Image (tube, coloured by chain):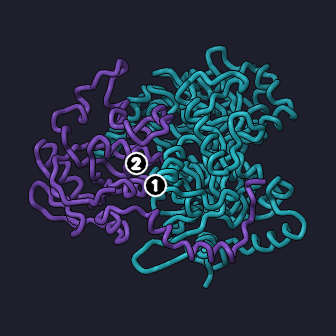
Amino acid sequence: MKPFTNFESRVVPLPINNIDTDQIIPARFLKTTSKRGLDQQLFCDWRYDAEGRPKPDFILNQPRAAGAQVLLAGDNFGCGSSREHAPWALTQFGFRAVISTSFADIFKQNSLKNSLLPIVVPADVHAALFQEVTRDPDAKVKIDLANQTITTPGGRKVEFPIDGFSKQCLLDGVDELGWILQRDAAIAAYEAAHPAPINALK
Amino acid sequence: MPRTIIEKLWESHVVHEQPGAPTLLFIDLHLVHEVTSPQAFQGLRERGLKVRRPDLTIATADHSIPTTDRSLPIVDEIAAKQLAQLETNCAQFGIRCLGVHSDQQGIVHVIGPELGLTQPGMTVVCGDSHTATHGAFGALAFGVGTSEVEHVLATECLLQRRSKAFQVRVDGALKPGVSAKDIILALIARIGVGGGTGCVFEYTGSAIRALGMDERMTVCNMSIEGGARAGLIAPDDTTFEYLCGRPHAPRGARWEQALARWRQLPTDDGAVYDRTVTLDAGALEPMITYGTNPGMGMPIGAPLPDPAAVSDPMERDSIAKALRYMGLEGGKPLLGHPVDVVFIGSCTNSRISDLRIAASLLKGRRVSPKVRVMVVPGSQEVKRQAIAEGLPEIFRAAGCDWREPGCSMCIAMNGDQLQPGEYSVSTSNRNFEGRQGKGGRTFLASPLTAAATAITGVVTDVRTLV
C-alpha cells in the first residue's frame, strides 16, 4: 500500500441510505480470480442500461465525477456481503475516501485495508455537505488524515474518528499482515496451550 | 464478575494485546470458498507464505457452482476457471477441499455444522458475511474480507476490536405457520439493516430455546442483515444432541470433557448487555419483505408502507425508490401479488428441516403452472437425507425443480437467476436490487410461505391453506 497523503477533491454525492455491496459491485462480477479490472463494474447496474450504455442521469457518468476522489453517501454505506471487491472497485475508479454517517462493519475493515478512508461525520455536517456539493459541483473538500479532519467547501473544519492503529497503517502505507507475522512467538505460545478441537485434514 | 458468552468467547481466544493496537485473536475454524479466496492465495504466493494451520481450514465450492447435473461440464468458463483455481490452491497449500465432485460438497455454512467441524466455544471465520450461521452452536463466528482471509490463512489470527453485546430476547411460543425465519425478519424490520452495527447479537429467551439447530442457524444466519458482525445462541442439550456422533465431533472421554467445557459457556446470571431488544414470539405473524433491503419487512397481511406518511426525507426517498424498483404501490396489500419464481434454498433455509416443512405442504398438491419452483438442498448430505425420506419425489410430483447443492439463486452467480422484472418469493437472505438476477424482484420469506406461494402462484399466507 502507498502511504495515505492529504488531498483536496471534488465530491460525488449519492444521497441514498443503506447502499449495499451488491450495488457497489454486483455478484456476477465476483467470478474473477484477480483484484484488478473492476472499475468499469463499480455501481454497474445503476451506471449502465440494459444495452451497456452509460445512463446520463447517474452521477458517476457526469463530468463532475471525472477525477473526483471522494464519495458522499447516505447512512450505513457498504452493508451486505463481505466482498472486498467493493473497495477494490471504488479505489480503482479513483475514490480515496467515502463520507457517511455510518459504515457497515465488514466494509469498513475492508476499506481500511485498501487505503480507502471511511469518514464518519455527524448528521448535521453530512446534510450540510450534501447541500453544498449539490449546489456547486466543483465544491471541494480537504482531507487531512494525520489531523483527522475534513474541511468542508465552506471552510468548516470537522474532526472525524479513526482508531490509532488503522490510522498509522494508512499513513505509513503498511498492511496488518506484516504486523501479525511479527507476533509469531505469541501465536506459537497460544497454539501450544490450546490443543486443536478438530483436525479438518482427517 | 459475571460475563456474557460473547465476552467468554473473546477472552478465551486472545493471543496478544498491546496498547495502541487491536487484539490479536486466534481462529479455530476457517471456512474457504471459491469466490473470496483466490486473491488471498495469490497474496500468500507473492509473499512466499504457507497456510499456518491446514488442520483448522476446510474449503468447498458453493457460490459459483452450477446446480445442474454434476457429471456435465461447467459451461460458464469464468466460473469453471474459478472452481478449478480453488482446487489448485487447496492442493498447493495442503487444504482439504470438498470440491465440485465431493460427496460432502455443499454451502459452506451448511457443511461446517453437519460435519461437526463447528463446535461450541470456537471462533469461526469465512470470507462470507453469513458466517454468523455457526453462532447457533455458541461459537463466535463472523464474515471477513479477502485481506483477512489471507491473514487467517497465513497466521490463523485476526486483529479485532471488541464488539458491543446486544441481547435479542424472544420469549413465548410461535403460532402455527410462524417459524424461525419470521423471528429474524421481524427483528430486522424492527431495528433496521444498520441496527446492529458494531454489535454481536446473543439470541436468548424461551422461543429461541425451543428451536431446533436448523432453525437456530436460520436465525443466526441473518444477523448480518441487522448489521451485526455476529449472532449467537448459547449451547444447550439441543446443541449437544445435534453434535453427538458427527464426523468431527469429539468421542468417548473427549466428548465428556468437551461437554463439561461447553456447559460453562452460557452467559452468567447478572452479566450486562450493552443493549437489549425483546420480541414476543406469540405476537409474531408470518413475515415478508416488500423492498430492497432485508429491513423492509412486514407481517404478510399488512398493507405496503406509504412513503407519503414518512417524515424523514431520506427515509421517504428510500422507501419510494424501493417500491418503484419493486413495481409496488404504497398502501396496497402484498397478499395476492403474482410471482414468477419460488426459490427454496440458500445458507438460510436449505437444511433438511426446511425441506421437510416445504414438502409437508407440497405433498399431494401441485404448484401453480405460472410459477417456476426451484428446490436446492444445502449440501450433498442434505440431499442424501432428503432422498432417504422421499422428499425429491414429493417436490417433483408437485412440479418443482429439484437441483444439486449450492448457493444457487440466493446470489445468482451460477446461472440460476431471475429475468429482469420477474418476482420471486425466496427463502434466502437478501432482497437487494438485482441480487437474484439483474432487474429481478425478491420477496424474502420462510419456507412455509414460499411453499404456499408456489401452490397458489401469488403471495399467500400459509395459514389460509392448512
Q: Colour of chain B?
A: cyan
**Which circle marks residue A106 in the picture?**
1
Q: Which residue is mark 2?
A: A78
Q: Which is nearer the eye, B241 or B91?
A: B91
Residue B70 appearing in the image: yes
Mark 1 near mark 2, Cβ–Cβ under 8 Å? yes
Residue B300 position, x and y percent, is 57, 37
Residue at the top extreme? B369
Q: Is tag 1's residue or tag 2's residue first in the polypeptide sequence?
A: 2
Residue B136 appearing in the image: no
Q: Which is nearer the eye, A46 or A114?
A: A114
- A93 in relation to B367, above or below: below
- Quarter location, residue B439: top left
Q: Are marks 1 and 2 on the same chain?
A: yes
Chain letter, purple in picture = A
Chain letter belonging to callout 1: A
Q: Secondary structure at mark 1?
A: helix
Locate the C terminus of chain A by quadrant.
bottom right
Chain letter belonging to callout 2: A
Numbered disc total: 2
Looking at the image, residue A7 sits to the left or right of residue A80; the answer is left
- B19 in relation to B131, above or below: below
Q: Secondary structure at mark 2?
A: loop
Residue A35 position, x and y percent, is 42, 42
